[in-house]
Image: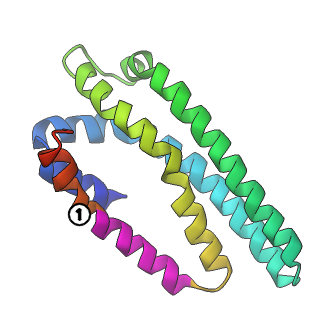
Amino acid sequence: MPIIWLIHGLWQNWAQYLLLQWDLLFRWSCFCTFIAGSIGTGVTSLTSHALGQSDHDSSTRIVTHGFILTAIISVILAIAGYFTISPLFKLLGANDQTLPLVRNYMKVWYFGAITMAFPMMGNGILISLGDSKSASRFMVLGAALNCILDPIMISDCSMA
């Protein structure tokens, strides 16, 4: 994730972005990442245990329920966060100058947050299956896609 934030900063106004990212947005994005990572860790652990016992039906059920739980919690966090941007970030220290920047950034971020947890869980499941090379490749691919798409989405589409 830090490489993604670095690339975002390269294509946006550094002063505005760094102030928001490291002072305000970092806390909330870490909270959401920790929630998603916790679910992913639990699913990975239970899946590994079921696969170790050659119980493929249980592992399939665990993964399916994990993805459903992740989707539900992600949607709840995104909707709740979207409608509480101003009070939440005022509580985190945003002032009248930074709050419009936070609002613009977080409106887009919350829609992306819905799908943020799926790659983390998928990588954990790949690792629990013993395929850590594929998990690493997907992580590198995600960072590379971010490097390619950020300039297009931020500069060309005026999404900054």
Give the residues drawn in magenta, as a range.
132-145
The residue under label 1 is which amino acid type? Cys
What is the secondary structure assignment of the residue under circle 1?
helix
The question of residue 143 being in magenta is answered with yes
Judging by the rendered image, the residue that carries numbered circle 1 is: 147
Question: Left or right of 138: which side holds 54?
Answer: right
Quadrant where the image shows the N terminus: bottom left
| Residue 120 belongs to magenta span | no
Q: Quadrant of the C terminus?
A: top left
Where on the picture, by quarter, is residue 67? bottom right
Q: As drawn, is 36 to the left or to the right of 101?
A: right
The residue under the point 76% across, 71% down is: 47
Horizontal and vertical percent position of residue 37: 58, 55
Front residue (pair 88, 152): 152
Residue 92 appears left or right of 62: left
Q: Position of residue 112 (x, y in %)?
A: 43, 45
Picture quadrant where residue 120 is located: bottom right
Q: Quadrant of residue 60?
A: bottom right
Q: Residue at x 42, y 71 (%)?
A: 139
Of residues 95 and 109, the one nearer the viewer is 109
